Image (cartoon, rainbow, N blue to C red):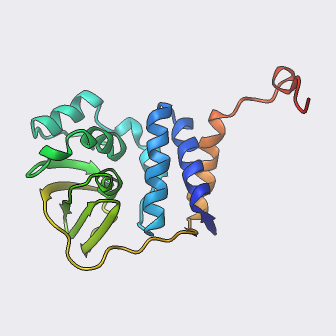
């Protein structure tokens, strides 16, 4: 089914919060989901949210990024993306091992004024200034990959942006709606009191 970009952003934000992420990170998740959906990029938020317990802790992630230390547990792409936003100027030459769904990082680096190339097994993309350029995409939807960062200008034509909506997997959509329901207030006499006045 086709959903609007607003619906995608709203559901992603609520599902992230319903999965236990803080509101600030849930907000970033919603905006990232919208940005990726507008470019028809194949990511699965449900997979990220369902596997949160398997991901490395924040301390392990920071050590893996700051000290290029290998981490046995995969790194969460949402947490890594938010953490790397502050480091963008010094990411040139950085290698992050064992990153889950690296395509999520495209959004976080798209907000920069500088161009950054992200490479992993058969995929090369250059992001910055709100745009995305793909030159290779053999493993674009890799579940886990080692990602290399470099400063590099884009070539070719940017990926087109849909301003309306896009097709979403119905099974994943329903699963995200179930998670989103966790952040709603349960119906009770107290919650209904004064409604409609």
At horizontal 50% and vertical 33% (from top left) the residue drawn is 23
- In the displayed structure, does residue 133 sit left or right of residue 11? left
Viewport quadrant of the N terminus? bottom right
Q: Residue 46: x, y in percent? A: 49, 50
- In the displayed structure, does residue 36 sit left or right of residue 57? right
At horizontal 29% and vertical 79% (from top left) the residue drawn is 157
- Name the residue furthest bottom: 156
Query: Which quadrant of the structure image shows residue 55?
Result: top left
Depth check, front residue: 31 or 102: 31
- Name the residue furthest top: 190
At horizontal 56% and vertical 65% (from top left) the residue drawn is 168
Q: Residue 80: x, y in percent? A: 29, 42
Viewport quadrant of the C terminus? top right
Q: Residue 69: x, y in percent? A: 11, 38
- In the displayed structure, does residue 192 sit left or right of residue 27? right
Residue 23, placed above or below residue 157: above
At horizontal 59% and vertical 42% (from top left) the residue drawn is 179
Query: Which quadrant of the structure image shows residue 51?
Result: top left
Q: Residue 63: x, y in percent? A: 16, 32
């Amino acid at each position: 089914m086709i959903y609007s970009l607003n619906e995608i952003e709203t559901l992603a934000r609520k599902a992230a919060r319903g999965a236990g992420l803080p509101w600030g990170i849930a907000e970033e998740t919603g905006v990232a989901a919208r940005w990726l959906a507008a470019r028809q990029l194949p990511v699965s938020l449900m997979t990220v949210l369902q596997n949160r317990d398997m991901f490395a802790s924040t301390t392990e992630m920071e050590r893996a990024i700051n000290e290029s230390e290998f981490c046995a547990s995969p790194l969460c792409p949402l947490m890594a993306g938010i953490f790397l936003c502050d480091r963008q100027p010094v990411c040139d030459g950085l290698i992050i091992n064992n990153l889950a769904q690296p395509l999520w990082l495209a959004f976080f680096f798209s907000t920069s004024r500088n161009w950054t190339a992200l490479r992993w097994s058969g995929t090369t993309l250059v992001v910055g200034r709100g745009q995305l350029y793909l030159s290779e995409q053999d493993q674009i939807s890799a579940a886990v990959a080692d990602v290399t960062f470099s400063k590099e200008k884009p070539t070719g034509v940017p990926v087109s942006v849909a301003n309306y909506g896009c097709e979403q997997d119905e099974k994943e959509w329903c699963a995200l709606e179930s998670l989103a329901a966790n952040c709603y207030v349960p119906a009770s006499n107290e919650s209904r009191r004064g409604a409609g006045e």
